[in-house]
Amino acid sequence: MVKVRIWGSLTAATDGRSEVEVDATNLRELLDSLAQAYPGLQPQLKRGVTVAIDGLLYNDDWFTPISDDSEVVLLSRLQGG
């Protein structure tokens, strides 16, 4: 199981939980597992999120590996100009 820290306003979609656990070995599995476990996250996941894995930010690198001891943070997609 991967522990995922849910950041900011995304906790509203996880019943206020700031940390959840899901089964995943890569980024795609992580997002799919989160969508299944927390349907309220689906709209945000469709719009796009950023996932920090061990301090590096990922958006669409679906096969990025995740291990059970990885530090994983889910946050709204960062945008800027």
Image (cartoon, rainbow, N blue to C red):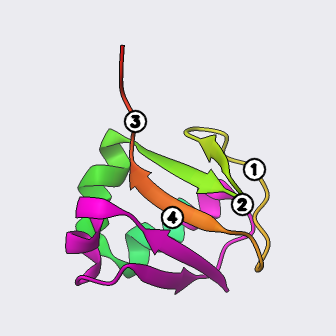
Query: SS at mark 3?
Result: loop
Tell me the CA gap for discs 2 and 1: 5 Å
Residue type, label 1: Thr
Query: SS at mark 4?
Result: helix
Q: Would you name the residue on which mark 4 appears?
A: 32
The answer to which quarter of the image holds residue 11 is bottom left
Does residue 74 belong to the magenta stretch? no
Query: Residue at point 36% right, 21% down?
Result: 80
Query: SS at mark 2?
Result: loop
Query: Where does the image place residue 33, in percent across and percent down from the top left?
Result: 51, 72
Nearer to us: label 4 or label 3: 3
Query: Residue at point 72% right, 58% down?
Result: 54
Mark 1 or mark 4: name the one nearer the start of the chain. 4
In the rendered view, would you say 35 is above or below 48? Answer: below
Tell me the CA gap for discs 4 and 2: 10 Å
Tell me the CA gap for discs 1 and 4: 14 Å
Pointers 2 and 1 in contact (CB under 8 A)? yes
Residue type, label 4: Asp
Quarter of the figure with the C terminus: top left
Residue 78 numbered mark, or none: 3
Question: Few, some or many C-alpha atoms within 10 Å of disc 3 (few <14, some 14-19, many ≥20)?
Answer: few
Residue type, label 2: Asn
Tell me the CA gap for discs 4 and 3: 20 Å
Tell me the CA gap for discs 1 and 3: 19 Å
Query: Residue at point 68% right, 52% down?
Result: 55
Residue closest to the eye, 56 or 45: 56
Residue 26 numbered mark, or none: 2
Mark 3 or mark 2: name the one nearer the start of the chain. 2
Mark 1 or mark 3: name the one nearer the start of the chain. 1
Query: SS at mark 1?
Result: loop
Pointers 4 and 2 in contact (CB under 8 A)? no
Left or right: where 7 falls relative to 60:
left
